[in-house]
Image: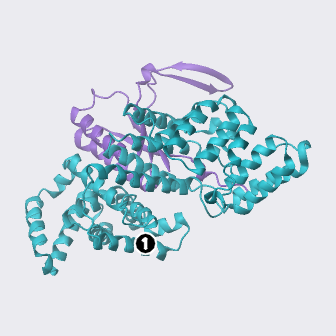
Amino acid sequence: MTSTDTHRAIDAVWRIESARLIAGLARIVRDVGVAEELAQDALVVALERWPESGVPDNPGAWLMATAKHRAIDLFRRNKLLQRKHEELGRELKTQQETAVANFDTANDDDIGDDLLRLVFISCHPVLSTDGRVSLTLRLLGGLTTQEIARAFLVPEPTVAQRIVRAKRTLTEARVPFEVPRGPDLAARLSSVLEVIYLIFNEGYSATAGEDWMRPALCEDALRLGRVLAGLVPNEPEVHGLVALMEIQASRARARVGPAGEPILLLDQDRTRWDQLLIHRGLAALQRAEELGGALGPYALQAAIAACHARARTAAETDWQRIAALYDALAQLMPSPIVELNRAVALAMAFGPAAGLELIDTLASEPSLKAYHLLPSVRGDFLFKLGRFAEAQPEFERAASLTRNARERELLLDRARACAGGPTQPGPR
Amino acid sequence: MRFMMLVKHAENLSGPPPKELMEAMAKLSEEAVKAGTLIDSGGLAPTAMSTRVRLSLGQVAAIDGPFTEAKEVVGGYAVFELKSKTEAIEGALRFMELHKKHWPGWEGETEIRQVFGPEDFPPRP
């Protein structure tokens, strides 16, 4: 292996092992920031040694043993943490010889518990949303600061600062490294799901920049969701979220045209949908339903996505069922965005006039004032009703509100189609 | 990035894989499922139960197995979603190490093939 090969191999090992490594260390040192630094230190040692010695047979165990030795050094230097030092000393003494074997055969439940604690602490409510997202991708996704910065189109120092601040906040707030129990669990779990879905959405419909999608970020979120489903297999909403992401991701290939332009759901070539992901998504949805979670917010959204996934052509879509599911969603978590989507479903199920009636009740909604989809959807209804003169300014307004360059082009196309009147071919 | 791993080996194996190997592979798969990376996998029936439909010299013909002329055949596959090809190589190394450890004398290979995704078709100007 050349040194470049070794460095690539180390990157891969890091990606595979870092979350478990940091999680295991955090249990010992009780501080996520310190745990990550120790893991990074071990990585630096690997970068120095492996090009000479080759990648060890069990790289994860090697990194863990190295990091634990670093931890001992750290505690020796820090007399204030004498007690922890002894604790760790005892643990190391008993584990030292068998550390390599142990890491491999350690009870899966232990590793699972450590990982789960790391998930909950990374998405802790004391942290800002940016802090939660950055910390989750860094500690659980194994992404570098640079990769996170690139994914979110922000400068690298900004991400580095968010991570430093988040780690400091956790230390200062003395957030315990534990899995929440009892009534806390539901609230904390929903914070975790929110962070994962936020990461997915940033990849799925990039809010800014030239690209319509950043697939790598979707894959990171899916991976995190699947990990979480394995850690808490009896939580229906986790399966609901995984189902939602799998089904949405199944359309990735079909929702970008040859010139990079977005293609809307109903215009997509469904033969390009990824049947493997659809199959996984439907199975996850079934799991959520079997666990009694059919009416959870993510499971409901997944059920809506599943209606589209099951329809072989756009015309076969069961819009009445979708409208009913949106109705249930609107009762569960009333929001103008849900109402907007419900309006679309109503229009498809019962005609554009039914949709327009609902959407006009949203016109004064302050939270939708700058939301491009409101005028975009209203424009669509008006267009379908043949009211082109009214539709045109709606599309133009939507174009002026979106931050996505590709979407803006699409909306301006539709505005131009209105100007041409009914003799023009309809937009995609 | 999506990868398909094709595991190839001589068709006429000396008996079924050792129990230890089956257990170790099951554990590795379970870990990969838990890590969210393994999204599909399967073992393939022997070529004696298989058929090739081949176009050659302008003729389409169905040829039933076994395909004795083939030195190695695909015995199984797995589909992974990973961050990089090196992550795929690392996974394949671990998989083959299990064979080395639990099935002395076995020879074969894991071929790593990337499955193209949307990011591999850059927009045309």
Q: Colour of chain A?
A: cyan
Residue depicted at 8% across the width and 70% down the height: A86
Chain of residue at mark 1: A
Determine whether, in the image, residue B79 is placed left or right of residue B117. left
Residue A213's place in the image compared with A387, above or below, is below
Determine whether, in the image, residue A69 is placed left or right of residue A120. left
> Horizontal and vertical percent for residue A105?
19, 48
Chain whose colour in the figure is purple: B
**Location of residue A46 (image quadrant):** bottom left
User: Viewer-proximal residue, A59 or B14?
Assistant: A59
> Horizontal and vertical percent for residue A236?
38, 39
Q: Amino acid at mark 1?
A: Arg
Residue A312's place in the image compared with A395, above or below, is above
> Horizontal and vertical percent for residue B117?
57, 47
Residue located beneath label 1 in the image: A162
Quarter holding the N terminus of chain A is bottom left
Determine whether, in the image, residue A10 is placed left or right of residue A102. right
Determine whether, in the image, residue A284 is placed left or right of residue A74. right
Quarter holding the C terminus of chain A is top right
Residue A23 visible at all: yes
User: Viewer-proximal residue, A319 or A324?
Assistant: A324
Residue A8's place in the image compared with A189, above or below, is below
**Location of residue A154 (image quadrant):** bottom right
Residue depicted at 34% across the width and 45% down the height: B34
